[in-house]
Amino acid sequence: MSLLSASFRSGLQTSQVFDYCITLQTEVFWVWGKKWDLTRIMFAISRYLTFVCVVLITYRLLVMRTYAFWKGSKKFLIVVVLFGILMIAVGSVISSEVNCA
């Protein structure tokens, strides 16, 4: 990836985070607490899918670099993958508990 490409992607991500921050209050008023319908589902996907993808890509790159640092240790890879699965499971449980309350 060239430096220009990395800078461009970083700029796009920064502008998306800025947009999220300045429109959060409006989103809370108009979207949160409303019933789930097709429009709200499409909004949530378009609004949050990019954040999820950035987090997953960042995690994958971090794991790959650390795996290489540990000289390709299979034990390390198993521990990190299991930790990632555990964090996803815990996040899902916490999210479902918050939504049920």
Image: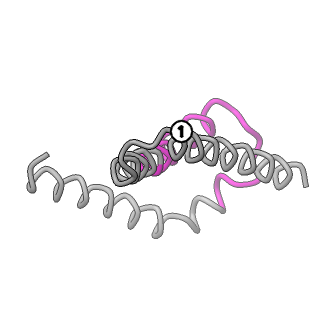
Q: Residue at x 63, y 42 (%)?
A: 82
Quadrant into which the N terminus falls: top left
Task: Give neighbour class at mark 1: few <14, some 14-19, many 20+ (Cα, 10 Å).
Answer: few
Q: Residue at x 25, y 59 (%)?
A: 10
Q: Is residue 65 left or right of residue 75?
A: left
The boundaries of the magenta stretch are 29-55
**In the rendered image, which residue does mark 1 sit on?**
45
Q: Position of residue 99 (x, y in %)?
A: 82, 50
Tell me which corner region of the image, top left, top right, bottom left or bottom right, holds residue 32: bottom right
Q: Residue at x 69, y 33 (%)?
A: 37
Would you place residue 14 above or below residue 42 in this image?
below
Would you place residue 75 above or below residue 23 in this image?
above
Q: How many marks?
A: 1
Q: Position of residue 36 (x, y in %)?
A: 73, 37
Quadrant into which the C terminus falls: bottom right
Q: Residue at x 17, y 55 (%)?
A: 8
Q: Position of residue 96 (x, y in %)?
A: 81, 46
Would you place residue 4 above or below residue 39 in this image?
below
Q: Is residue 84 left or right of residue 33?
A: left
The color scheme shown is one colour
* Residue 39 sits inside the magenta stretch: yes
Q: Nearer the viewer, residue 83 or 68?
A: 68
Would you place residue 82 above or below residue 38 in this image?
below
Residue at the right extreme? Answer: 101
Q: Name the residue type under label 1.
A: Ile
Residue at the top extreme? Answer: 38
Q: Position of residue 69 (x, y in %)?
A: 35, 54
Query: For numbered disc 1, what is the local secondary structure?
Result: helix
Q: Main secondary structure of the magenta part?
A: helix
* Residue 46 sits inside the magenta stretch: yes
